[in-house]
Amino acid sequence: MEDRIDIEADVLVIGGGMAACWAAIAAARTGAAVVLVDKGFVGTSGVTATGGPNHWWVPPDPVARREAIDRRMATAFGLADPEWMARIIDVTWRLLPQLADHYPFATDGKGGTFYSGVRGPEYLRALRAFATASGARILDHHPALELLVHRDGSVAGAAGYARLHRRAWMARAGAVILATGGCAFRSGLIGSHTNSGDGYLMAAEAGAILSGMEFSTAYSLSPAWNSTRTLPYFAARFFDAEGRELDIPPPMTGTPHLQALAAAMLAGPVHADLADAPQLLKTILRDIQPASLTPFERRGVRLFEERFEVKLFGEGTIRGTGGLRIVDEHCQTDVRGLFAAGDAATRELIAGATSGGGAQNSAWALTSGHNAGEGAARLARSIGRRAQDPARGTGQAGLRPASAVRAVDGQAVLRTVQAQTIAYDKALWRSEASLVASRACLDDAWRELSHHHHADGLDQVGARELAAMTATARWCIAAALARDESRGMHIRTDRPDMSLDKAFRLLTGGLETVWTRPETPAAQSRDTSIAA
């Protein structure tokens, strides 16, 4: 295409949040030529930019770190890896202070610096500045549509569409890092609109495998009219529309807390009351999570004085733990030259079957991004860019449909996807019967998209997002059906107990036909070493 934008780099990073920035920084600091492309504006897009992330912050004391790992292992339900946890803690401790030239860290009140907690907006702006200062080239509003692969199946780059230029782009690179975030199925979760599972779909089309997709039933409690951050609600009491107080287990109970809230919301409106919140929360909330207050101020609601209606916003695989399978310490996937970081990668390695919470999740985004950046740069140095070698695009649904092109009702497909993934009654009370029914609905939706949906120009972005959400939903449902037990956030009403013989990670993949299988030692033994 004569008007196509052609890009060449050693490392191509796809994404624009915390993990993507740390990946670009790490790769660029090795001397590699790095290009970062994002569908939004790097520094404001994604879920981190609206929050106040805390990091898993443990001093380099062997006893303290062993105790921190033991505490996390106790909540991972047998699926986490203590060696990965130790790696995450160590890298986070060493790297986060390096942002000091770009981020104004607060004091700890003891004459030192408070590194672990940061404000999302400033943090993302600082990461953008750090990435640029490290030598990375950032291309905003350049959504990726598909991966490119060589004849041997290894990744050759990616292709997409530049929104503002209204032109296609193609990037050739020695290695590609997917840091595209998770998938919230357009639930309205704050900051998640661009998180539609794009990386999962692109990777699967290239042959990658996913893991832990059954652990996708996370929700965020917010005012019903606008998603915000969840910090204030640990201090909430809940009431029905008639003013009767509801018996809701505390947030730390996890799924019982969500199930009780969801059951009450299915019966009618639920209101939160924060009048008894501690004074400290009222004092610091604006400083650490400013986005939490804005919706109340715009609506004229006094957060700590008036009751207000609340809703659960689905977080899917953002606070869930599933994602692309990682096969080495550099966060490489099953596809040679393709790396994954942040929510695009499975977080089971440190979180197991329960969400890592802000601290673990933030540390994972930082460390997986850093490791992927260093690994991708090393691989690119060893094999070169191979920019002149033949490569093909792997994108299918929305780009290259399998049958005759015809109109597809995208909104109807999205409603189907949401009904099977984030609707309270389906996600929080799973059973074989409900999952089989969901699978059938989603298979029908996928056939419509993969066989008939086609778009051109900028419309390709929406078409691929819809395909990605549908594909992600199918993998989540397939994994939930295959894991016929209850473990962590995955609850089966027909299999309420956890089985001792099922303490394995569950792999899934496939497009036209979705498959699942347990991860075995043999499946972990692939030679994916990166040349020095």
Image: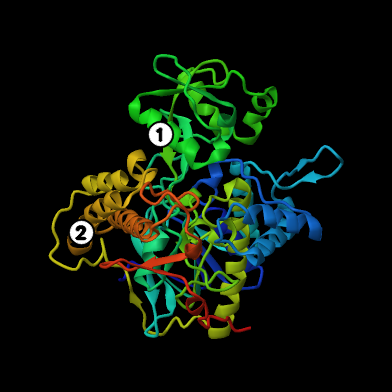
Q: Secondary structure at mark 2?
A: loop
Residue 283: x and y in percent read: 68, 25
| Sooner in the amino-acid sequence: mark 2 or mark 1 | 1
Question: How far apart, in angstroms, are the residues tagged by discs 2 and 1?
Answer: 35 Å
The relative height of residue 466 versus residue 525 in the rendered view (above or below) is above
Q: Quadrant of the N terminus?
A: bottom left
Q: Residues within 10 Å of mark 1 (few under 14, many from 20)?
A: many
- Say if residue 5 shows up in the picture: no
Which residue is depicted at the point 30% across and 66% down?
514
Look at label 2 and name its amino acid.
Answer: His
Which residue is depicted at the point 44% across and 40% down?
189
Count of numbered tags: 2
Q: How is the image coloured?
A: rainbow
Q: Residues within 10 Å of mark 2 (few under 14, many from 20)?
A: many
Q: Is residue 276 toward the left or the right of residue 225 in the image?
A: right
Which residue is depicted at the point 52% across and 28% down?
294
The relative height of residue 369 versus residue 118 in the rendered view (above or below) is below
Depth order, front residue of 144/212: 212
The relative height of residue 322 versus residue 386 in the rendered view (above or below) is above
- Say if residue 193 shows up in the picture: yes
**Residue behind mark 2:** 453
**Residue behind mark 1:** 262
Q: Residue furthest right?
A: 111
When asked about the image quadrant of residue 113, the answer is: top right
Depth order, front residue of 300/187: 187
